[in-house]
């Protein structure tokens, strides 16, 4: 393995985590991102960590990150559950042998991104300090969740202008990005110049690609009734992941590329794991193939 950049996948957090890990571990995944939606539910993190450690023992695979995707910037009960999930994951990270917690930054619903910044600083200032005290890093995923600069209900961290504002408000080395090219491509942003500019702030990469139908864009634009972009598993989309991994290496990235499956419009349902394992092997080849030791 090229252990400086591992290739892995996302695994849902909850009662089925360990069973799922046991089934897919033989395929050769090198890292796993255990992911929750909005809340941890009744998950006992200490128990789950012990079961996960036992499952991965001897495999060489690691837990690259723990994640909770919700909107922690609102004032309702669900937002508080999301904030509490982040607090608990920060405290439990070392039990999983990882130091990275990821998810959405959140958003004050349906106001422009700049009007969420005060609330962002209030919520994430406290979480950033808790994480720093534990030696934990925090990374924001870059999905717009259907939002724009003016309106949205999940995440402000989907545009580089917002990233600059966020990192200016809380200038900390333990705050960064969980970046994936797909979300930039469906916004018609070229991911490669962005990667070169922001690689120092990228702590984790979601392995998800996109196919952009430029003929549809040219004829109908991006606000019409015709879909112009599709999320894809790496190896089936428009990105050259050899270039992406090369830029990550040039920028000093050390971490994992974790495939975010269950989005591909072709390799889905019965073909889901076929697509993911193809993506795994494709990304390994883009990484340079099997490690070869230099002559002494």
Image: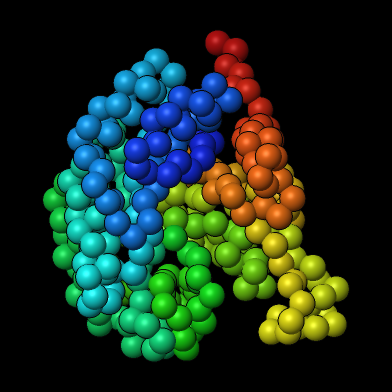
State the count of labels: 0
Q: Is residue 22 left or right of residue 128?
A: right
Q: Residue 31 placed where, x, y %?
A: 46, 34
Q: Residue 133 placed where, x, y %?
A: 14, 51
Q: Quadrant of residue 288?
A: top right
Q: Is residue 162 left or right of residue 42?
A: right
Q: Considering depth in this image, is 271 or 207 the residue closer to the camera?
A: 271
State whether residue 193 appears in this view. Answer: no
Q: Quadrant of residue 73?
A: bottom left
Q: Residue 121 placed where, x, y %?
A: 24, 75
Q: Relative to 273, is 240 above or below?
A: below
Q: Residue at x 73, y 72 (%)?
A: 227
Q: Residue at x 53, y 28 (%)?
A: 24
Residue that sits furthest to the top in the current view: 296
Q: Residue at x 41, y 86 (%)?
A: 110
Q: Residue at x 66, y 45 (%)?
A: 269
Quadrant containing the C terminus in the rendered view = top right
**How is the protein colored in the picture?**
rainbow
Q: Considering depth in this image, is 265 or 220 the residue closer to the camera?
A: 265
State whether residue 48 appears in this view. Answer: yes
Q: Residue 240 placed where, x, y %?
A: 71, 50
Q: Considering depth in this image, is 263 or 189 the residue closer to the camera?
A: 263
């Amino acid at each position: 393995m090229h252990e400086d950049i591992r290739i892995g996948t996302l695994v849902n957090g909850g009662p089925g985590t360990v069973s799922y890990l046991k089934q897919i571990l033989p395929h050769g995944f090198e890292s796993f991102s255990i992911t929750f939606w909005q809340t941890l539910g009744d998950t006992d993190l200490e128990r789950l960590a012990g079961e996960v450690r036992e499952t991965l023992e001897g495999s060489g695979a690691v837990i690259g990150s723990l994640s909770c995707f919700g909107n922690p910037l609102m004032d309702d009960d669900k937002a508080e559950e999301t904030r509490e999930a982040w607090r608990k994951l920060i405290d439990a990270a070392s039990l999983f042998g990882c130091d990275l917690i990821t998810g959405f930054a959140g958003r004050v619903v349906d106001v422009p991104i700049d009007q969420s910044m005060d609330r962002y600083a209030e919520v994430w200032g406290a979480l950033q300090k808790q994480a720093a005290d534990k030696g934990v890093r925090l990374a924001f995923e870059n999905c717009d969740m259907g939002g724009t600069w003016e309106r949205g209900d999940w995440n402000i961290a989907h545009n580089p202008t917002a990233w600059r504002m966020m990192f200016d408000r809380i200038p900390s080395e333990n705050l960064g990005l969980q970046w994936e090219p797909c979300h930039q491509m469906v916004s018609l942003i070229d991911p490669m110049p962005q990667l070169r500019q922001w690689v120092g702030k990228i702590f984790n990469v979601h392995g998800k690609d996109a196919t952009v139908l430029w003929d549809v864009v040219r004829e109908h634009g991006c606000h019409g009734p015709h879909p112009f972009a599709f999320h894809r598993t790496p190896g089936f989309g428009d990105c050259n992941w050899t270039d992406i991994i090369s830029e990550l290496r040039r920028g000093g990235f050390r971490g994992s590329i974790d495939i975010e499956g269950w989005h591909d419009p072709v390799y889905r349902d019965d073909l889901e794991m076929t697509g993911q394992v193809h993506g795994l092997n494709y990304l390994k080849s883009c990484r340079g193939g099997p490690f070869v030791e230099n002559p002494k």
